[in-house]
Image (cartoon, helix red, strand yellow):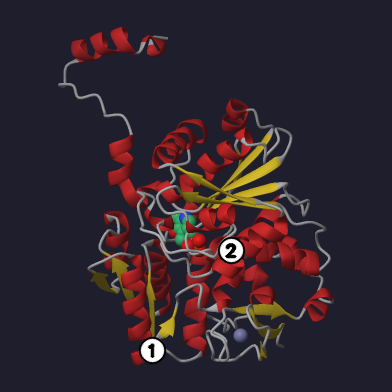
Amino acid sequence: MNTIKKLECTRCKRLLPPDSKHYCCPDCQGILEVIPDYPLLKTKNLKALWTTSPRKDIWRYLPLIGVPKPEGIETLRVGNTPLYQANKLGSLLGLFHLYVKDEGLNPTQSLKDRASVVACLQAIESKKNVIACASTGNAASSLAGNAAKLGLKAVIFVPSRAPAGKLAQLLAYDALVIRVDGDYQAAFSLSEKAIAHFGWLNRNAAINPYLIEGKKTVALEIAEDFQFQVPDAIVVSVGDGCTIGGVYKGFVDLVQLGITNKIPRIIGVQAAGCNPFVRAFLSKRPLEAMAENTLADSIAVGIPRNPFKAMRAVFESGGTWLSVSDTQILDAMKLLGKTEGIFSEPAAAASIAGMIQAMEKGFIQKEDHVVCISTGNGLKDTKTALEALKRPVDLKNDFHQLLDYITENKGELLS
Ligand SMILES: *Cc1c(COP(=O)(O)O)cnc(C)c1O
Ligand SMILES: [Zn+2]
């Protein structure tokens, strides 16, 4: 049974069959969009299927994702990440209903797993053994891990600044890692040439329309966590724009299926040192390429590859675009760690910094139900974290020295 109706070009609206082997529109090179067969899916009572399913990973949502998953194939356990009620952080900021979706608890510690596992199933379906991508780090480590589990070979192009944690993951999963001397754009462009030449499966998320269908499962989970009463606002950091596009698509699907009745305001957050979407939004001009000047490496994307879907997500949901400085990102990272016990990488903490700014600017009210998506785990980039955090207390193995230290500096520990 095919639950996908068609692919539609986001630029010229040309329709293609769902199993079309094109990544982009053959007429205008526009990015394609997967359109589920909503009338058919409506007859399947998906909501009951999801809430009663014994399996809690993203495969509950398979009919809505639209890639075939052969019987007997076991993937890593993607999704089913916790949505925490962040009461301490919320009350500190004056928000009554703040939630954090901790995507750092996916199998390779970022939201990217939701897309990578879909790409791996596509590779199996099209009988390709090699799968490739360019990535600032997380798409790469995620592809490598999911490919390893399924016996596929991953070829990864990373920019020279990829943090050590992500690089170590890639090598542990035994990917072929091509470290390109240059930025993300350089890595992306070399990967495109190689993929075209060798015919490997393309996991570059903007280009492969089914990957957003994987990413949208984060929105399906959030809706389910809210008993299908969707929150007022979602805050998410943005690089290429696929994640935010996926969040929007998930909520659109739920409305189309008659399961929910509204789409939350989607707030896109970028780093001030690399914020092409924010600039285009404020100046009402087309996107312009920018240098990638931020320590939030996962969202340092100078030429976003999915501009249409990202801008549509913000525009159609009545959201907005914000930029946050690297200092604000690191402060948010510390705040989230100490109030909620969640350690985020800088790009993920940007959503918290963006939420704080959205409150200050009046885009979020104190009674709103707000979800920040923490897209990746802080262990990915301990170098940046250690530079931002306070130092440990260095002492000899000497109890008196310890006692003096605690008496002088940490009176609150003397219970
Ligand atoms: C990839 C990524 C993002 C942004 O996703 P895009 O699709 O590039 O916009 C945000 N945070 C983390 C941790 C990521 O890995
Ligand atoms: Zn087109």
Q: Is residue 109 visible?
A: no
Asked where in the image residue 97 lies, by quadrant, the reply is top right
Q: Is residue 262 left or right of residue 195?
A: right
Q: Position of residue 70 (x, y in %)?
A: 57, 84
Task: Tell me if mark 2 has few (under 14), some (14-19) or many (20+) residues whose alpha carbon lies within 10 angstroms of its own.
Answer: many
Mark sitting on residue 122: none
Judging from the image, what secondary structure is the residue with disc 2 in? helix
- How far is mark 2 from mark 1, CA to CA? 26 Å
Asked where in the image residue 243 lies, by quadrant, the reply is bottom right
Residue 87 vs 129, above or below: the answer is above
Q: Quadrant of ligand 2?
A: bottom right
Q: Which residue is mark 2?
A: 310
Q: Which residue is mark 1?
A: 196
Q: Position of residue 35 (x, y in %)?
A: 70, 79
Q: Which sits in the foreground, 339 or 71?
A: 339
* CB of mark 2 near ligand 1 (< 8 Å): yes
Task: Tell me if mark 1 has few (under 14), some (14-19) or many (20+) residues whose alpha carbon lies within 10 angstroms of its own.
Answer: few
The residue under the point 57% across, 77% down is 210
Residue 153 vs 88, above or below: the answer is below
The amino acid on which the numbered mark 2 sits, given as a three-letter code, is Ala
Q: Which sits in the foreground, 391 or 58?
A: 391
The residue under the point 24% across, 9% down is 404
Q: Is residue 357 left or right of residue 201?
A: right
Q: Is residue 176 visible?
A: yes
Quarter that holds the C terminus? top left
